[in-house]
Amino acid sequence: MLQRPTLFSRLSSRFASFPAFSRSIAIPYRKMAGVPSTYSDPVHIAVIGGTGIQSLPGFNLAATLTIDTPWGSPSSPISILHHDSPSGKSTPIAFISRHGLHHELAPHEVKNRANIAALRSLGVRTIIAFSAVGSLQEEIRPRDFVVPDQIIDRTKGIRPFTYFEGGMVGHVGFGDPFDENLAKIVRKCGHALEGEGVTLHDKGTLICMEGPQFSTRAESNLYRSWGGSVINMSALPEAKLAKEAEIAYQMICMATDYDCWRGEAGEDVNVEMVMGHMKANAENARRFVGAVLDELSKEEHAEQILAKHLEGMMKFAGGITHKQGRGEEVEKKLKWLFPGYFD
Ligand SMILES: CSC[C@H]1O[C@H](OP(=O)(O)O)[C@H](O)[C@@H]1O
Ligand SMILES: Nc1ncnc2[nH]cnc12
């Protein structure tokens, strides 16, 4: 009888045809007694933690994976956590710390391509990303949560932002940068926590700026005049790459400051302010993420967490370059990311 390939054997055979990346799978990052460095089942859901959320305590750590991708290593080792939902079902969740385990990566240094590629290689098709944001509107107060539905790109083109370059061209729709079905689930969970210290704004336009310096007052006011709700430095290219990787992606934002647009009416943003609010509200952030994971673990969301509505999209959106015009290196990389799409 044919054995269903385990994730490890699937990855091994993928690496076997791409020797340059064959060595570093499953090498323990820092040997932690008793924590496996391999994981054999597919993992469909991931959480990307941002500022102040370098780990997700309260979950059972099942494995710590070090995965090398054609775009290098992710920002941090990937923790596989077992999430036990109230129904008794255990669901594996992959967790990456965007800025590294010790917040050592600046926004423009985050390993976005490797992060998303490594998650996809594990089977991830749903990402909940967390971010500390500045508020551009009076009614979005520090410690409020926002589930944004739009992004304005104010990064400066210095971050690698696509998998399709160097001889394979792809164009993916980005009219809705977040996954609306996933957003509905996230909003429902957030509202269920309201009254217990959680205030949620259902929509919002997120400005993603380059940083690492915060905005000037003129910029901050300009973003307000554009209808910006909140501002951060990390939604892009993360959301673009997730879209290219056919992964349903939603960011949950937590306001930590009013940026600098209030002038004399309030103190300008600074790191202490951001960290202070993050720390004070970390428990709510974790409860929010936990509630979303509980909900996503339900059988009724099985299709959604596999992002069936996105499956196969890049075969066409990423396949416009004729075989004879393809760059050899990028073709190898994309075959690693999308086995079977570009044969
Ligand atoms: C520490 S303030 C600026 C920093 O905070 C946000 O991080 P993340 O989105 O990863 O939570 C923002 O994007 C900046 O990177
Ligand atoms: N004011 C701000 N600008 C950009 N990123 C932020 N993250 C938290 N607050 C921020």
Image: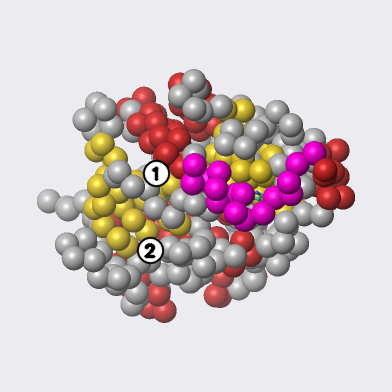
Near mark 2 (Cα within 10 A), the count class, few <14, some 14-19 or many ≥20, is many
Vertical arrangement, residue 295 with respect to residue 100, above or below: above
Spot the residue most to the left. 1
Closest to the observer, 248 or 77: 77
Q: Is mark 2 on a helix, strand or loop?
A: loop
User: Is 276 included in the stretch rendered in magenta?
Assistant: yes
Q: Is the magenta stretch mostly helix, strand or loop?
A: helix
Which residue is drawn at the image coordinates 18% and 65% (left, top)?
A: 33
Given the image, on which type of amino acid does mark 1 rest? Ile
In the rendered image of this protein, does residue 278 appear above or below residue 28? Answer: above
Splitting the image into 4 quarters, where does residue 296 fall?
Answer: top left
- Label 2 amino acid? Pro
Residue 252 position within the rendered picture, expressed as x and y whole percent measured from the top left: 54, 39
Tell me the colour scheme of the image. secondary structure
Q: Name the residue under label 1.
A: 45
Specify the segment rendered in magenta: 265-280
Q: Nearer the viewer, residue 165 or 201?
A: 201
Q: Is residue 137 left or right of residue 97?
A: right
Q: Can residue 312 be seen in this view?
A: no
Residue 184 vs 2, above or below: the answer is above
Q: Mark 2 points at which residue?
A: 77
**Image position, residue 334 (x, y; %):** 51, 63
The numbered disc on residue 134 is none
- Disc 1 under 8 Å from ligand 1? The reply is no
Which residue is at a point 35% across and 31% down the rendered structure image? 294
- The residues tagged by marks 2 and 1 sit, at their Cα atoms, a distance apart of 16 Å
Q: Position of residue 58 (x, y in %)?
A: 30, 43
